[in-house]
Structures are given as structure tokens and as C-alpha cells.
Image (cartoon, grey):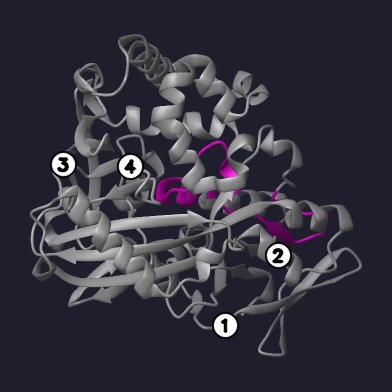
């Protein structure tokens, strides 16, 4: 095989697979190295009491163009299903409707003026297209400016605090705007939200991408962490795995940036420093299988001093095929002592919370529970994030490094990772005739 056609791709999450997929489409031979025992990263699935389900929840919006394109190419369009979903808010000790103008007007515990300002902010956030003017704000200040102190304290402050902890006051306004806009644009009118899922879950897409890559000569190596990216004379020479050197003149890394300094010590010091300074917090997700429904909502924000969670995702209110499945994500810095709590601690808390939310739930209604941890799950993007983010193209010939923060201000998502990964592969091929 012509070694110039071989490209090493580090990481088999959606972005890494997208890079490999596009390279294979262009006639190159990607060799993907993944430390995990399965493909998919945060989209990977596991066997949960007889069903294959994702370790971390995902959904699709009507604006996910890159996702739709790859489904079309892989003939998976018929697997995409759409459903009208509901949002809720656990506030003042009860479930309240949320996510549309009527729900906002009926919301109990908020003054009319606070409701008006909150609605105005949501409306203009969805309509806004140019995010650059927002870079001068941190998210908390920007939201307070629009919605006022009352609405911020009651509806936003706890959500931020229980996800970002000490980083709450240094979050990017464009980043939070992109989240508001994405959900807002997935409505077929101001009152109805429409979200999508794949029959069989994300694993259906992951498997199809894997098959496509392998049928064209590509290779996906699991349980094979890259130990070192070898660089000499300002050129990438290859990688070291299991103590052995593998020669490549092009390497594309898609693993979380905080992991890069450990395998690429020969990078310029200013780039290593930039990666080391990037914050990426962890996630502990509890997945519960119930005998019956918890609420009618797919997504429910939580504001209750008795609960240390910002929200609940009742996935079965989007995808009925899986039974009654509920995700409870605990995002937190890895140095938070709670991150190392035993699985049983998280499960017991979630059971208690569910019984508060739905008093009809009895112990017999809790059929199973599973806990999953991801060490680098959420990049923390500060204002002017791109100013301190090195470009994916390294000043090392043949070396490219990116992760989900590179499509800032968009937040992590399957469509965004696939779109960026494919574009990155095209950049690699344009830059140099490899």
C-alpha cells in the first residue's frame, strides 16, 4: 500500500469517524486508533437490561444538516423519526409546563415583568444570526442584562451552578446563545417542539460509518490508545502504540484537547500551554429504567434545593421504543469529590428525586439503573474562546489537532462533530497532496 495514502486518525468518536469516513470517500486509507473498547465516544451504546441504548443521551434538531446529509449518503434516512415533545420545569415543588409563550405566561413563581423579559430574550436569541457582538459578554451578564435579576436567579442561576460550578461566571455568551437558538429553531410553530431520534439509536449510524470505512480499506483499532505522536524536524513521522512505532506522514487527532499534551510533548510550548489551560469537565450520568412514566416531558429543568441536578431527560418521551428510560446527568469538574462517589450514591439520590417529582412511583417501579462516567465530557468555553484556541492545522507538517470545541460557538453535538470532521478531512487533503 502507498504509505502516502494512509492517515492516522486518533479517536473514534463522531468527529474521528467523520474524518475517517471523508478520507475513505476521497480514496485514502484511514487507520483509526481508539482507546475505548467500542466506537462512538459519548455516543457509544451499551446493553441495558436487554436493550442497546446510548451511555449519554442524544437527540436531533431540524437544523442538523450535516447529520441529514450523512444519513442520506448511507441510506439511513428511513431510520430518522420525528416526534412532538414537551419541556417542563420542576419549580416550587411541582412540574410546570415550559418552553412556549403560553407556558411562560402561566408559570407560577415569576412576576409578569420577569416573564416578559425572559420571553423577549428567548425570541431575539432565536432570531439572531450574528453571534460576534456577544463575545464581549460572559453568559451570566448577558442573560441578566436581558431577563433581569429575578428571572436569572429563579430560572438560570441554579442550572449554571450545578453544571459549571466555579466556572459559572466565565462562560461564553455566544456558546449559551447557540444552545438557545438550536432548540428554538427545532419548532414547527411557537407552541410545538419537534425533535428527532434514530430507530436503533446512534449505534445504527456509527455502525454504518464503520462499515463504510472498512469496506474501502480503512482500519479501526479498538483498545489501542496512542502513546505518542512522533515529531522530528517540524514534521510528523508517525505514532507510538503499544510501544511500537507506526509510520505516518499525516496524523489527525480528535481526542479532547486536555489529553493532547500527554502524547505530543514535542509541540511548541505555547500550543501545549493553550491545551493545558483549556477546561473540560466530566459527567456522571445515571440511567434509570422505570415501570411507568415519570412525567410527560422529554426535557425538564430542575430548581429545587433538595436536588443537586440541573435537569432530567426522559428519553422515552422522545423514543417510545426503549421503554421508560430516564437520564440524569451530573456534570462537574473532575476534582469535585462527588465525581468519585460510588455508583450507588448517585442511584439512591436519583430514586429519591424521582419519588419527589412523581409520588405515584413505588420501589417496584424502579426496574434497573446504570451509571456511566466520562472524564472529558463538556468543554468550558470562556468569552472570546477562539482567541486562545490553536487552529486545527499545527505548525508541524502533517499534523492536525481538533476536538468538539473547534466548532465553537456551537455546543457538542453529533451533527456538529460530523460536519466539522468531514470539513477537517477536506482541509487536510487540500493542504497537502498526501
Q: CA distance from mark 1 to mark 4?
A: 40 Å
Horizontal placement of 68 versus 297: left or right? Answer: right
Q: CA distance from mark 2 to mark 4?
A: 35 Å
- Quadrant hosting residue 384: top right
Which of the two residues, 434 or 244, is positioned nearer the viewer here? 244
Which residues, given as a range, are shown in magenta? 392-420
On screen, residue 70 above or below 376: above
**Residue that label 3 marks:** 83
**Residue that label 4 marks:** 302
Quadrant where the image shows the N terminus:
bottom right
Mark 4 touches mark 3? (CB < 8 Å): no
Q: Residue at x 29, y 57 (%)?
A: 327
Q: Residue furthest front?
A: 306
Which of the two residues, 158 or 394, is positioned nearer the viewer here? 158
Which mark is first along the chain, 4 or 1? Answer: 1
**Residue that label 2 marks:** 260
Which mark is first along the chain, 2 or 3? Answer: 3
Residue 75 in sight in this render: no
Amino acid at each position: 500500500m502507498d504509505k502516502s495514502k494512509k492517515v492516522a486518525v486518533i479517536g473514534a468518536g463522531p468527529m474521528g469517524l467523520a474524518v475517517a469516513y471523508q478520507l475513505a470517500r476521497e480514496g485514502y486509507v484511514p487507520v483509526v486508533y481508539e482507546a475505548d473498547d467500542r466506537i462512538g465516544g459519548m455516543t457509544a451504546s451499551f446493553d441495558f437490561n436487554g436493550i442497546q441504548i446510548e451511555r449519554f443521551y442524544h437527540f436531533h434538531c431540524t437544523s442538523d444538516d450535516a447529520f441529514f446529509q450523512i444519513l442520506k449518503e448511507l441510506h439511513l434516512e428511513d431510520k430518522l423519526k420525528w416526534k412532538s415533545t414537551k419541556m417542563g420545569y420542576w419549580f416550587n415543588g411541582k412540574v410546570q409546563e415550559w418552553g412556549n409563550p403560553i407556558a411562560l405566561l402561566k408559570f407560577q413563581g415569576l412576576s409578569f415583568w420577569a416573564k416578559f423579559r425572559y420571553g423577549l430574550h428567548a425570541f431575539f436569541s432565536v432570531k439572531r444570526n450574528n453571534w460576534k457582538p456577544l463575545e464581549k459578554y460572559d453568559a451570566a451578564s448577558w442573560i441578566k442584562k436581558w431577563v433581569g435579576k429575578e428571572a436569572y436567579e429563579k430560572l438560570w442561576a441554579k442550572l449554571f451552578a450545578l453544571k459549571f460550578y466555579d466556572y459559572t461566571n466565565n462562560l461564553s455568551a455566544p456558546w449559551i446563545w447557540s444552545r438557545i437558538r438550536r432548540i428554538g429553531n427545532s419548532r414547527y410553530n411557537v407552541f410545538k417542539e419537534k425533535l428527532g431520534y434514530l430507530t436503533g439509536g446512534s449505534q445504527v449510524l456509527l455502525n454504518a460509518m464503520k462499515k463504510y470505512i472498512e469496506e474501502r480499506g480503512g482500519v479501526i483499532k479498538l483498545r489501542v490508545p496512542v502513546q505518542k505522536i512522533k515529531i522530528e524536524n517540524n514534521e510528523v513521522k508517525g505514532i507510538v502504540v503499544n510501544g511500537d512505532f507506526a509510520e505516518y506522514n499525516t496524523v489527525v487527532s480528535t481526542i479532547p484537547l486536555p489529553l493532547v499534551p500527554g502524547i505530543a510533548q514535542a509541540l511548541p510550548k505555547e500550543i501545549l500551554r493553550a491545551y493545558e489551560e483549556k477546561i473540560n469537565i466530566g459527567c456522571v450520568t445515571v440511567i434509570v429504567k422505570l415501570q411507568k412514566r415519570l412525567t410527560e416531558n422529554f426535557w425538564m429543568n430542575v430548581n429545587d434545593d433538595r436536588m443537586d441536578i440541573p435537569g432530567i431527560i426522559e428519553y422515552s418521551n422522545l423514543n417510545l421504543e426503549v421503554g421508560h428510560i430516564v437520564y440524569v446527568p451530573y456534570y462537574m469538574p473532575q476534582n469535585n469529590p462527588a465525581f468519585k462517589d460510588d455508583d450507588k450514591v448517585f442511584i439512591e439520590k436519583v430514586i429519591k428525586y424521582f419519588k419527589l417529582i412523581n409520588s405515584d412511583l413505588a420501589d417496584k417501579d424502579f426496574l434497573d439503573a446504570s451509571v456511566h462516567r466520562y472524564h472529558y465530557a463538556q468543554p468550558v468555553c470562556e468569552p472570546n474562546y477562539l482567541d486562545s484556541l490553536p487552529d486545527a492545522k499545527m505548525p508541524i507538517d502533517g499534523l492536525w489537532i481538533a476536538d468538539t470545541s473547534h466548532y465553537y460557538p456551537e455546543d457538542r453535538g453529533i451533527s456538529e462533530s460530523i460536519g466539522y470532521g468531514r470539513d477537517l478531512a477536506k482541509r487536510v487533503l487540500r493542504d497537502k497532496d498526501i
